[in-house]
Image (tube, rainbow, N blue to C red):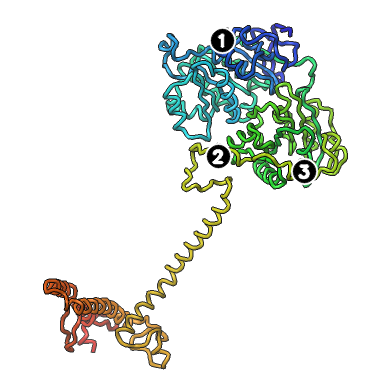
Amino acid sequence: MNEVHTHELLTDDSGTETLETQETITNDAPVRQESLKTFSDYGVAPEIAQSLADAGILNPFPIQSMTLGVALGGHDIIGQAKTGTGKTLGFGIPVLQRSIPAEHPDYAKLPVPGAPQALVIVPTRELAIQVGRDLTTASKRTTLRVEVIYGGRAYEPQIESLQRGVEVVVGTPGRLIDLHRQRHLNLKNVRTIVLDEADEMLDLGFLPDVETLMAAVPAVRQTLLFSATMPGPVVAMARRYMTQPTHIRASDPNDDSVTKKDIRQVIYRAHHLDKDEVVARILQAEGRGRTIIFTKTKRTAARLAEELIDRGFAAAALHGDLGQGAREQALRAFRHGKVDVLVATDVAARGIDVEDVTHVINFQCPEDEKAYLHRVGRTGRAGHKGTAVTFVDWEDVPRWTLINKALGLNVPEPVETYSSSPHLYTDLDIPAGTKGRLPRDKRVLEGLEGEVLEDLGEPGRKPRQGGKPRRGEKGHRREEGHRDESRDEGRSRRRGKGHGGRAGEAETHDGAANLETGAAPNGAAAAEGSAPAEGAGKSGHGHGRADRQSRSETKGEGRRRRRRTVTEEAGAEATHAPAKEQAAKAASTALAVHLVEGEDGATLDRGVAAARRRRSRTRRRNGEVVSRTESE
């Protein structure tokens, strides 16, 4: 491997933004060719080199070997390399080696001991998890603490980790800014800041957030920027925040295309009604290993994953509508081999670092050449071969023409392909006679259920109680149906209170009146042809003034009558009781019911008698209230 050192002006992809660099370093070796030297030969600390050796990583790749010598010296770097070239350790090793562990004598001299000394900013949660995993592997034999901070998880565990103290923080811009504004993330110690996949952060609109974080760290620092492409805003940000950076470019001299030569690219023009069948046949190709299928929309990803599971494949969906726990469950199942088909949106295109992905399928045509590069870059990693299959709908042909021209793929007119096309079987090594369902004897993987769904305490989501599944989890549909039934039952109860309850109340009152007067219940007297009482309502329905008076009287009288009946029964039972108990019950009887003698000699309750007196004093005549005697 021969490194070439030159002094060139860094220019963005459009040619409008320029940046003067200290030097430009390139090489003439394949990007995945391991160096003959070891990491120790490039000045890597023995603890970190041994941690990498324990993981089977002995020799650096070109982007790593070119970066280590410059980054360990504290210089700013702009690293430009294709996806999957191993640049994570290129910045990860200098970040770890330049951090001071807690047992070092200089640790107490830091402005804020325990605050992070290095900050790595990435665009997606999945990429944050992957970078954090690589840094943890490289620091296993050290005492350095690495914390991964991103949204979708509870704040409390992340805050507790920051309070205990960390040396390196890997995170997404949104959650980092939240914790910084809440004064939980102190950036006064930061000596190294890394911007990984800067062009993707530009596409996602994160550059303003990145600049906010850049302004919060000390002015004297080391800045490492890595990006597959160099758009104008990225070059402008580098010019603003970096000091005489070194431009490192890893390129394969035998690979003139924009994409990696290890990836075989197949483009078909397919009908959207036949895509599911074509995918099911491709998934049964010879030598097919882990496969990622990319879709444009979250709904398409969820639908296609369910369809493939129904056809017998071990598939899982990964999209933005899933909670963080479900997203991590799908990624773990994919990495551990419990599912071998991952249906994902572009949210996962930058964060899945699985080396043995053999196939990538673009279920729908990507938006532009950048999205295409990010998608197909998930295969052909770590020196492995890969296959990328892209479906182009009839309406997407103009878009594909632009992508083809930008990337130089020389496929201006994709071949029209159906699930029964002979060239589909020969192009992708699909056995003859393959159908759209996986045979039962080949369904050997556990599936998504083989991984535990963790409750991460996601903000905005209520914790589960009693094991009830959330939306998108197994059994949720049954819970929704149960909830609908309960809602209907509640409506019926409310309806009964609003309408039937009134009727029931009237029925009770009428029954009390019948008990008092000895009449037949439910209007039996009316059935015999008796005339309505004076003051009764229309058609004798009992809503007149006299009826209201009698109902009020009889309601109170009925209560007193029942109380007297209970009292008399108690008195009869008490005849055989001791004298003291009989005297006590007699006293309670006297207190419970107070009776008076009416005008006709009948015994009345005092309350009923008082109500009758109040109503009998006055009458209304011609709109005026007069005494009863005068009205008669």
Q: Secondary structure at mark 1?
A: helix
- Can residue 613 be seen in the rendering of this structure? no
Q: Is 397 positioned to the left or the right of 607 in the image?
A: right
Residue 379 position (above or below residue 627)? above
- Quarter assignment of residue 373: top right
Q: Secondary structure at mark 3?
A: helix
* Amino acid type at mark 1: Pro
Q: CA distance from mark 3 to mark 1?
A: 52 Å
Where does residue 295 sit, x and y in percent of width and height? 70, 38
- Residue density around tag 1, few if under 14, some if 14–19, many if 20 or more, within 10 Å: few
Q: CA distance from mark 3 to mark 2?
A: 30 Å
Which residue occupies the extreme right position in the image?
A: 422
Where does residue 256 sit, x and y in percent of width and height? 79, 19
Q: Which residue is mark 2?
A: 453
* Amino acid type at mark 3: Lys
Task: Give the number of callouts.
Answer: 3
Q: Which residue is mark 1?
A: 46
Q: Which mark is residue 142?
A: none
Dot placed on the residue nearer the N-terminal end, 3 or 1: 1
